[in-house]
Amino acid sequence: GNMPLWVALTAAVTGITTPNTSLATVPVGYFGGNAAHRGNASIEMLAKCRIVMIEKWEGHCWADCLANPNSTACLPECDVESLILDTLTRVKAINPSVSTVMYFNTLLDFPFYKVHGNFQSQGADTIDSTSTKPIILRNDNGMNGIFVFGFDTDVGVQLYIDFIKNMTATGVVDGFFGDKWNDGAVEQNGEWVICNHLCGNVSEQQGMAWNAGKKKALTAATDIVGDGPYFANGPPFEGDGSNFNGHWKDTPWLRKGDPRDGIAEVKKLLANLTYVYASATGDQKWNVDPNSPSSLQGACVGDCLARFLLAVEKGVFLGANGWDESYDKPLGDPVGDAVYTPAGAGKPATLRRDFASGTYVVFTYTSATKGSGEIFWEGKPPPPPQLHKMM
């Protein structure tokens, strides 16, 4: 049979592509996955993004396994990695400068990953100290039957590190979404447990070894990725963080409140991080049709985009999960921070920020914490709102 495209390309491409942090235009990101096969329009949309993070539910494995826990989609042979790699390969074929991220949990060993077969065959999932069988947990979306990486064993730690090495070696994975970053073995009421909706028991010695092993695995994983994007979803684990964080879901200051809260948060995050994500939406779900025109539309325009631009710095990305023509318009580096002008002489308070292209943003307050923002691209006023015909 034909070898998958990503295998053929592997020999030609090596090295991590770091996210393009230029502010020449709006730095946009995507995070999600679709069960349906992506048509070219979806791939072309992704290829316009600076950073593309693909969820564990890309392709059919997740949806089929969720629907039927006895399905072969719940087994390592489903190989969700190759489905994610296929999408990322198609994106890189259009735009090699996209920085790509694969979802890989730091606690839950999902059974439809091919690599789960390695953990299984080498006895490298965490064993429950009471039942002496592998611990089985439930994920946040209600999927049962999920194993736990055996960080309490040397082989479990090594298999995790090898996976990170092998995926980055494909040339189409530049980083990872490390979900459950801060989850480990904890002591509850004198018992050591590892939990996610359900709990498994571990001995104290096993729990301590598990936490030490996870720390070792995460340190090695982030070293391999280097300046590639490694989203640590959670606080640092035993002092170990990563270079990428923020809101992968519903950034509060993009939608409401005083934009100065967003400015302050971005500055605080950038003090410790290289990359910051500010999503205007959630992670796109498996049941979204990637080939419907509505799924290709950017989730942040108008006031939302104005709020983002008031806070943006190099290294900050807007999670839009789609495209809008405004994301291509000239921006340029900010001339400085946003300038607040208090209300006076019958005029409302404003917050204004200017960019090198002549583009500027004005947020006009209607109260101490409310108002709305407008973008003057290259210094021109926004067109009056039009009634769009339905497609």
Image: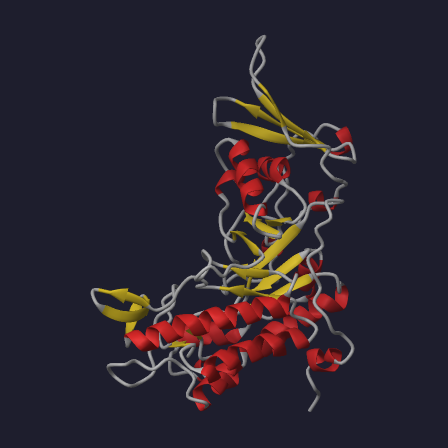
Q: Determine whether, in the image, residue 157 is placed left or right of residue 322.
A: left
- Which quarter of the image is occupied by the N terminus? bottom right
One can see residue 24 in this view: yes
- Which residue appears farthest toward the top when viewing the image? 345
Q: Quadrant of residue 307?
A: top right
x and y percentages locating residue 170 in the rendered image: 68, 77
x and y percentages locating residue 139 in the rendered image: 38, 68
Q: Determine whether, in the image, residue 228 is placed left or right of residue 79.
A: right
Decide: is 363 above or below 8. above
- Which residue appears farthest toward the left when viewing the image? 189
Q: Determine whether, in the image, residue 10 is placed left or right of residue 250.
A: right
x and y percentages locating residue 15 in the rendered image: 72, 70
Residue at (74% x, 82% y) in the render: 8
Decide: is 262 above or below 240. above
Residue at (71% x, 64% y) in the render: 17
Residue at (60% x, 68% y) in the render: 223
Q: How are the colours assigned in the image?
A: secondary structure
Pick whichever, 361 or 135, lies toward us: 135
One can see residue 136 in this view: no
x and y percentages locating residue 97 in the rendered image: 74, 61
Report the number of numbered marks.
0
Residue at (47% x, 68% y) in the render: 215
Pick whichever, 234 or 303, lies toward us: 234
Q: Determine whether, in the image, residue 99 is placed left or right of residue 379.
A: left
Pick whichever, 268 or 48, lies toward us: 268
